[in-house]
Each structure stands twice: as structure tokens, then as C-alpha cells.
Image (cartoon, rainbow, N blue to C red):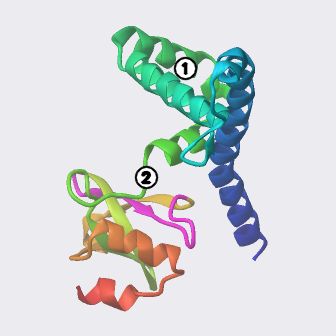
Amino acid sequence: MFRFIKTTILGGVLFLIPGVLLIVIFQHAHRIITKVAGPIIASLPFERVFGIAVNDLLSIIVLLLICFLAGLIAMTPIASRTASVVERMFLSKVPVYDVAKIKLTTPLRFEGEGSLPTLLVRFDDQWQIGLEIERKDDKVVVYIPGAPDPWAGAVSIVTEDRVTLLPAGTQDTMITFKQLGKGTGKLLST
């Protein structure tokens, strides 16, 4: 029970950190843009456009422009190499960075290209639902998602005779784990 509570709280923190950081960054950017654009805004004959304060509207437009330009820069090969170096040299040494990066860059959308086969895996006297990661010779690497956070799971290596392929889609499997197993019968009979 303690492990469940600890894992759930940690998962909640990791889920909230990116959103909180974005809010803080946007608040600071809004203040800076409002100060810089103050003289321009003061010279305008109106204070509101479509019910929105001009300084807020201008801040939003400038922030979107900055994000767009940053996205364009991020697509260049030199920016990609620089980001890889910074990540390898510094960020990967921060304990929660790898987990946060995976959560941010890999949403729980597995259907279509890159979908992982859903398996029923036998461990001695119990069965668990998992996702096939890869096969090598007669071994199968299986990811067993956690519940209610499918990202908090375990990786197991089992022989092929211990797995049964299920017709369920990966997205349905992940939703079942988020719902603490509710809908498992549907996964088994799909």
C-alpha cells in the first residue's frame, strides 16, 4: 500500500512539473513583454480588442511568435546536436530528467505505427497482461504496465511458451491499466 501511495504521488509530481514550469515561464515572459511593449501600448487609442486587454493580447502574440521561432530553430541540425550534447553532459545526470522526458515526449498513443502487441504472460501460478517490446531467439522482452500509472511498470524477459498474443490494441490495454484493471475481460475476449 505504501509503495502504491509513493508511486502515485511521484507520478503526480512528474505529471504536474512540466505544466507548472510552463505557467511560471509564461508569467515571467508576460511581465517582460508588457514592460517592453508598454510605450507602444500606451500610444494606442484603445485598451481592449474583442474584450481582451491589448497588453495581454500582445503578450500572447509575442509568446506564440517566440515559440514558433524556437521550434524552427530546434529543427535545425546544429540545434539538435547541441541539445544532444547538453542532454548527455548535464541533463541526464538529473535523476528525474529521463522519466520526465519520456513522459513529455511519448504520449500514451500507441495505435497505428509503432503499436506494441498485447500479451498474456504466465508467471508460475499467475497471468499478467503486458506489452511485447521485442523478441530475441526464444526470449520475449515484455513490459508489464503498472496501475493506475501505466508508465510505472516492470520489464521482464520470458520464454516464448509463457506468452499468448491478445487481439487487444495497445491503447485499450493502457486504458485498462489506468482504470485499475476495469475492462480486462474485454481485452481477453477481443
Q: Viewed as shown, does residue 156 lie left or right of 43?
A: left
Residue 57 in which image quadrant: top right
Residue at horizontal 67 percent and vertical 18 percent from the top: 43
Q: Is residue 181 above or below residue 163?
A: below
- Name the amino acid, label 1: Arg
Which disc is residue 9 wearing? none
In the image shown, does 82 or 41 lie closer to the viewer? 41
Helix, strand or loop for disc 2: loop
Assess whether residue 141 is covered by the magenta stretch: yes
Location of residue 54 in the rendering, given as x and y in whole percent from the top left corner? 62, 34
Asked whether residue 46 is drawn in magenta, I would say no
Question: Residue 94 appears at what percent x and percent y?
Answer: 69, 31
Q: CA distance from mark 2 to mark 1?
A: 22 Å
Image quadrant where residue 62 sits:
top right
Q: Nearer the viewer, residue 86 or 3?
A: 86
Q: Which residue shows up at 51% across the image and 44% down it?
A: 104
The residue drawn where x is 38% and y is 20% is 72
The three-letter amino acid code for the residue at tag 2 is Pro
| Residue at which label 1 appears | 88
- Front disc: 2 or 1: 2
The magenta-colored residue range is 136-151
Position of 180 relative to 36 (above/below): below
Residue 107, disc: 2
Residue sitting nearer the eye, 136 or 94: 94
**Residue 48: where, in percent of width, then height?**
62, 40
* Rendered-image quadrant of the C terminus: bottom left
